[in-house]
Image (cartoon, rainbow, N blue to C red):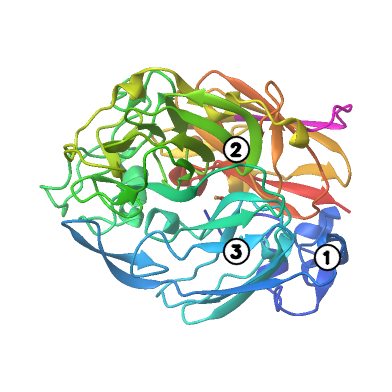
């Protein structure tokens, strides 16, 4: 997901100068992107916006991240990969709304990296997009991120460099609400992922195979016992991974699906007591997989999506696209229950156990009936009154037609890949509407950096929204966070091969 260095108009500013770390300010960008008078990530407007957000006496929460090669035990299987920890997800970062988060990153990888704070309306120069908001953090290098976290909610962090997110480089950021009104007895954080690294191919191999074989064909050197399926076709008449809810459901058939770092053969256990109310913060950190999530013998009451509250809505199962989060509340029954995340339209599932009493352990293929009852997509929820975007006339509309092909493997916005796309211009203070028009046969979870939009039809406040084939989803937001913001599909293979565009504030 890092923009390539061949992009026109964007790169001159960063490649040829001292970059962003210094005090050069907007001057560092002159002649690059900013020939169009765009707001510089390290310029005054961004700095002023951050000062306005910062409260006097704000507490600073400090943390460190050390991306590095690690060996993980996925449960009955060791894999070599890259992670922030010797386990996955990476360290849980936790702050209160209004705090300053300061994270020192030391890059122990043999590759450039970066850290993006997914969903956070932060200052633009801390957004973690190499080539746009910062220089990449070189192998052995260090970088400090420091920014105010304005809004409570469930967020996550991951690199914005290539397909590194498809390794173990992700972790959760919880921003607590100082005025939390929800009542619950305990909290579980549940992170779901699709897994391939260390099973005979890396995510970079997967990308190369998609690009060289148009999304099908065999790749030598795989672990045959582990590879249930191969990279499949999602377009062009050979749809092997489709879902009635989402249409084309992905390009990669993963050998494993994880919940909190464990495959279904060795699931984590979440312990509680009968009748306790538990808040579950669900995060889909996968790269190419949406999950249908249910807890056997329980219903889920969704209270938040992408960090922001919704009118509490009860369902049996919930679908989360890549990059989406949801907070749900459950009232625990007595026994042993399966928390299942089915890879939507694919083969396999993630599993965790919920244990509040005696009971037998379910098998890895357990299929609670809730999975096939009332299934909800979070874009269909309605915003809680407190976070409803006020009505006002739209100042600016951008239409983003989503398309692509498997052969060659490339994904596009308005018919072009990122390197050929002019930015979507917005003016400070404008009400902006983006219309995502999906003309492809696959679903795309569309993500906007630095803003929490409102889905126009429902009001749901989100930063990532699923757009299914032949659907148009309109979203609106107020342009109050100046800078250069990536807007892209959160299928990492789609983003990396072109489905990304810069949402650019003009001076
Ligand atoms: Cu999690 Cu650019 O995104
Ligand atoms: Cu996509």
Q: Residues within 10 Å of mark 1 (few under 14, many from 20)?
A: some
**Where residue 185 sits in the image (x, y, percent)?**
50, 47
Query: CA separation, marks 2 and 3?
Result: 30 Å
Q: Is residue 440 visible?
A: no
Depth check: 35 or 63 in front? 63
Relative horizontal placement of residue 101, taking residue 194 as reference (left or right): right
Depth check: 219 or 483 in front? 483
- In percent of the image, x 44 and y 49: which residue is there? 188
Relative horizontal placement of residue 31, taking residue 129 as reference (left or right): right
Residue 304: mark in rendering: 2
Label 3 vs 1, first from the N-terminus: 1
Query: CA separation, marks 3 and 1?
Result: 29 Å
- In percent of the image, x 29 and y 31: which residue is there? 346
Question: SS at mark 1?
Answer: loop
Label 1 vs 2, first from the N-terminus: 1
Q: Is 294 a magenta residue?
A: no
**Where residue 440 sits in the image (x, y, percent)?**
49, 25
Label 2 vs 3, first from the N-terminus: 3
- Using the image, determine if residue 22 lies above or below residue 487: below
- Using the image, determine if residue 419 lies above or below residue 440: below
- In percent of the image, x 83 and y 53: which residue is there? 36
Residue 130: mark in rendering: 3
Relative horizontal placement of residue 435, taking residue 273 as reference (left or right): right
Question: What residue is pinned by disc 1?
Answer: 55
Query: Mark 3: is the Cβ under 8 angstroms from ligand 1?
Result: no
């Amino acid at each position: 997901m890092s923009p390539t260095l061949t992009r026109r108009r964007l790169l001159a500013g960063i490649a040829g100068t001292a970059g962003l770390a210094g005090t050069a300010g907007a001057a560092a960008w002159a002649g690059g992107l900013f020939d169009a008078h765009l707001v510089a990530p390290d310029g005054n407007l961004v700095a002023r916006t951050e000062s306005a957000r910062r409260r006097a006496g704000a507490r600073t929460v400090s943390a460190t991240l050390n991306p590095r090669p690690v060996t993980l035990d996925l449960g009955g299987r060791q894999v070599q990969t890259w992670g922030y920890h010797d386990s996955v997800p990476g360290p849980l970062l936790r702050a209160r709304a209004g705090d300053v988060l300061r994270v020192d990153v030391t890059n122990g990888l043999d590759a450039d990296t970066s850290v993006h704070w997914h969903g956070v309306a932060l200052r633009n120069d801390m957004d973690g997009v190499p080539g746009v908001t910062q220089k990449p953090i070189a192998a052995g290098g260090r970088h400090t991120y420091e920014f105010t976290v304005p809004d409570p909610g469930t967020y996550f962090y991951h690199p914005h460099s290539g397909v590194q997110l498809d390794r173990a480089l992700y972790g959760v950021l919880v921003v607590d609400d100082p005025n939390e009104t929800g009542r619950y007895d305990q909290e579980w954080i549940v992170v779901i992922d699709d897994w391939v690294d260390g099973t005979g191919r890396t995510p970079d191999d997967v990308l190369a195979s998609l690009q060289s074989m148009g999304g099908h064909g065999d790749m030598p050197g795989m672990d045959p016992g582990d590879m249930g399926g191969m990279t499949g076709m999602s377009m062009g008449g050979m749809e092997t991974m489709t879902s009635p809810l989402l249409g084309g459901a992905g390009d990669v058939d993963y050998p494993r699906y994880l919940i909190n770092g464990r495959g279904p053969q060795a699931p984590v256990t979440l312990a509680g007591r009968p009748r306790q109310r538990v808040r579950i913060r669900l995060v889909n950190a996968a790269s190419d997989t949406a999950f249908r999530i249910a807890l056997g013998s329980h219903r889920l009451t969704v209270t938040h999506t992408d960090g922001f509250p919704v009118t509490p809505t009860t369902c049996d199962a919930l679908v989360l696209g890549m990059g989406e989060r949801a907070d749900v509340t459950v009232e625990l029954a007595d026994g042993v229950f399966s928390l299942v995340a089915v890879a939507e339209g694919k083969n396999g599932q993630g599993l965790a156990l919920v244990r509040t009493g005696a009971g037998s352990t379910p098998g890895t293929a357990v299929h609670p009936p809730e999975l096939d009852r009332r299934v909800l997509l979070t874009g269909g929820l309605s915003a809680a009154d407190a976070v409803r975007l006020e009505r006002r006339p739209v100042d600016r509309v951008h239409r983003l037609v989503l398309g692509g092909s498997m052969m060659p493997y490339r994904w596009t916005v308005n018919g072009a890949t990122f390197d050929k796309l002019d930015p979507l211009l917005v003016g400070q203070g404008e009400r902006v509407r983006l219309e995502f028009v999906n003309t492809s046969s696959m679903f795309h979870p569309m993500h906007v950096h630095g803003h929490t939009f409102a889905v126009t039809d429902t009001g749901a406040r989100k930063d990532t929204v699923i757009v299914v084939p032949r659907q148009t989803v309109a979203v609106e937001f107020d342009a109050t966070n100046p800078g250069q913001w990536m807007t892209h599909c959160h299928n990492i293979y789609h983003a990396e091969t072109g489905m990304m565009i810069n949402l650019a504030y003009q001076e």
